[in-house]
Every structure is written in C-alpha cells, then in structure tokens.
Amino acid sequence: MSSILTCKNLSKSFGSKQALNNINLNIEKGRIIGLLGPNGSGKSTLIKLCNDLLKPTSGELQIMGRTPGIETKKVVSYLPERTYLNDWMKVSEIIQMFQDFYQDFNIEKAYDMLKRLNVNPNERLKTLSKGTKEKVQLILVMSREAQLYLLDEPIGGVDPAARDYILDTILGNYQENATIIISTHLISDIERILDDIIFLKDGQVVLTKSVDEIRDENGKSVDSLFREVFKC
Amino acid sequence: MLNKLLKYEIKATARLFLPLYLTIVIFAAINLLFLDVPNASDKAFSSYGLMIGISMFVYVILMIGLVVMTLFVLIQRFYKSLLGDEGYLMFTLPVQSWSHILSKLIISMLWTIASGFVGFCSILLISSNKINISEFFSRIAMAFSQIQQQLGASTFLVGFEVMVLGLLTLASTILSIYAAIALGHLFNKYKLLASFGMYILLNIVSQIATTLFGAIFFNHSIFTPGGAYIPDLLLINSILLVSILYSGVFAAGYFFLTNYILKRKLNLE
C-alpha cells in the first residue's frame, strides 16, 4: 500500500527504437532512489513518462494509484534534464509563477536557497550562466513540498563545490514520507545519499537493490558495482 | 487556472507588441509632420525629400513587420512554449491541456485585433492631412444609418452576428494553425515541415468543405449574376447564422483535435 510509483510491463518506443522494454517496478514511499544507467539507457524516458510528457506505448505506470495527469502533477516535482526557463522572466517572476500554480510551493524556502546559492532574484534568466540556471531550476523544484521528486541529472552542470550544497539541499528539503528519484551517471557524488538503486540498461531493469544490501552482499560501493555491471 | 495562464501569456507577449505599436505610432506621426509641410513635393529632390522617403520607408517596413510579427508570435507562442523546451514547464503544471490552448487562443486573438486596430489608426493618422477625419467618420456614420434604414430594428442583431462571425472566423483560423502544428508534432522527424504540410492539407479540406457547403445551402438567386435582388432580413439573418454555425463547427473541430493530440499523444522528446 505504501508504494508511490508502480510500473507494469511498461514499454516505450520512438518509431522503431525501443527506449523502455517491459519495465516492472514498485517504488515505496520515503526512499531516495538512484536511477542509474549509461547514456541512452532509458532513464529520462522513464521520468518523462511519470510526468505525462510522454505516453507509454504499452503497459501502465501509476503514481499513488493514478495514471499521470493533473492530479499527479500536483504532487510530483520534476527537474528536467534541460533548462525549461523562458529567457525573458526575472528569477523573482518565475518564483512567483511557481507560487501561483503550485499549492505546495514554499516561497520563503525558495528565497532562502537563492540567498545561500548567491543568485540575485532580480536578475533576468537570460543573463544567467547555464550552471546558475540549473541551480534556479533545482531551487524551484525543491521548494515544493511534494510527495515525489523526480530529478533528472540534477548535478550534471554545476561545479563540484556546489554539488555538495545541492545534495544537502535535496536532503534537507523533503519531508519524511516523500520519495526522491535521482537519475544520474555521476554515481560516486550521490552515492552517500541513496537508499536504493535501480540499474537500467538498454531500456530494461537489470538490478534493483538497497545500497546496504550492495555493501553487505557484494562488499562493494555502488560506483564499483556499476562499473562491473556496465563494463564496456 | 485559466486566468493565471492568461496573465502569463499576456506578460510574455505584451513586451513584444507594445514597443512595436508605440514605434509605429511614432513613425506615423513623424510622417504626418513631414507630409504636412506645404509644397513638400517641390522639394522632392532635396535632402528634405530624402527624409520623407526614408521615414515613409521605415513606416512601411514597420507595417509589414506588424503583420509578420503578429503571425510569428502566434505560431511561436504555441510551438515554442508548449512543444519546445518550455513545454517541460507548461505541461508539468497542474493545468488541463484545453486551458493551455484556450489561453494561447484568446491572447492571440486579442493581439491580432489590436495589431489591426493600431495599423488602421496609424494609416488614419498619416492621412489626416489629406482627408478630413471628421468627414471620414461622418461618412461611416451615414453608411451605418443607411444600413439601419434597410434593416430597421434588427440592425443591432445583424451587427452582433457579423461580430460573432468575425471572431469565430479569426478563432478558427488560429486554431487551424495550432492543429497543424500539433499534427506535425506527431511525426518523428521534420516536425516543422510536417506542420506546414498539415496546414496546407487542413486548408484544402476546409476549402472543399466550404465549397460543397456553399453549393448546397446558399444556392439562392442572390448569388446569381444580374439578379437585381434586394436581400431581405430573413435571408441575411439565416446566411449569417448558418455561417456562424459553420465556422463554429470548424473552430470546435480544430480545438478538439489539438486538445486530443496534446492530451493523449504528447511526446516531448
């Protein structure tokens, strides 16, 4: 009953290219899950399916027992792998926009994080660097008090010094029973915050395990296990 | 939620249109001042004439720009903000897809009408030394009173119907562009080219439908050449009502098609 995300025989193809092939998953509440896999393994596709930006070719996906739609969008906070910010707004205006549209948005938290990361709210988004834009997006996403956070490559574009702060931000800004799914290939950086991992390869789930199990049974870090499983 | 979307759509577009409108009015005024100087044509080859030429040229370019930009923004606000990268934000908002379409449509209609109005006023402004503006308006008023004599008490009704028909035609034109873009987006490759092709296709279909429809329903002596026939009120009314219904059906068809694609077939890659 406590599962937040379930996939049953979920497949997605683009034309003749199969991006996800018969995925079965059951993700429980209150966990931090690493969705790990090499480029093109289907990580973003899976996350986009959760956000209703893509439609499954077959099978089904449910968030809190509902197919993705307006009700799930209210409780899912999504960080895409690209910048979706429109150029002409100021940072403060996009924050206002989130405040307008999401009931679970906490504006104080957003301004607090902006301050900590030295982002000027009166700056136009156009003038921000790519890394700063990513920080703004992450702040927007983490300022929501959502049930499920879907973070697609949250630390890819920011410098290593900011990475630690961002990970702490992620950890410090979610409630007990909320769930976080982080997709990345920068495993060693995020390993310390993960509870569970899902390995994706060529659109299929090859492994789901808790990080503790990996350490106990395999005697390895997630990073070295990943290198072993995905050895080229 | 619709009113919030409308608010942001206005914000996103006003910053483009308002400066252009202002520039057009300013250049119309500059042209008016230049043309207002007596015997200006005698000085056609002087530097003064050159200035007239340049300011007129700029004005004409601006007017062309007005048409192009109105159309461009209409397309771009739909394509880029829903199906481009910004779509990742718009489609993860807890908002129904029809509200997105409706907000884009309403604001596009608003700017199209505003652009037409600004263009018309700027022409009036430039020609205000050549024609007598008050006479111009009194002529229009006269024309209206003649119409009123013909139609009697129903003038208001007919005027209202004409207005509704105009708005619906505008809406269905814009929605046909949206539908074409949405259809084009279903293709895996060459989405823009496909959208363009779909627009042509939708137009051919609607042209054929209109021709057939006209041939069946409006096969009346009013349209036969040489028929000295004064249309009666009932006929005018019924033509207008049928036309309203007709473009309403088209607008609704395009709307539902676009909504179906955005809701059920959306694939942001």
Image (cartoon, rainbow, N blue to C red):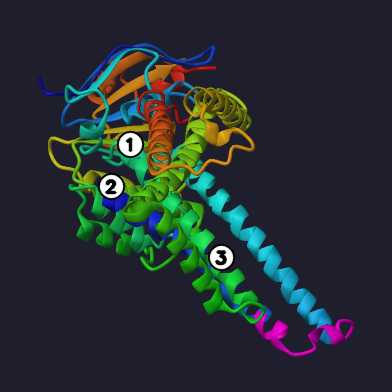
- Share a chain, discs 3 and 2? yes
Q: Which residue is mark 3?
A: B120
Report if the CB atoms under discs 1 and 2 are less than 8 Å apart: no
Report x, y in % for residue B15.
47, 64
Chain of residue at mark 1: B
Report x, y in % for residue B126.
64, 75
Residues drawn in magenta: B32-46
In the rendered view, would you say A171 is above or below B9?
A: above
What is the distance, in whole Å, between disc 1 and disc 3 at their CAs? 33 Å
Label 1: element kind: helix
Q: Which residue is mark 2?
A: B2
Label 2: element kind: helix
Between A100 and A139, which is closer to the camera in this rendering? A100
Q: Amino acid at mark 1?
A: Trp
In the rendered view, would you say B65 is above or below B161?
A: below
For label 2, the crowd category at 10 Å Cα-Cα, with few meaning under 14, some 14 to 19 and many 20 or more, is some
Q: Amino acid at mark 2?
A: Leu
For label 1, the crowd category at 10 Å Cα-Cα, with few meaning under 14, some 14 to 19 and many 20 or more, is some
Q: Is residue B243 left or right of residue A110?
A: right
Report x, y in % for residue A115.
31, 64
In the rendered view, would you say A172 is above or below B33?
A: above
Q: Quadrant of residue A8?
A: top left
Q: Is residue B220 left or right of residue A89?
A: right
Label disc, if present, on residue B98 of the rendered structure:
1
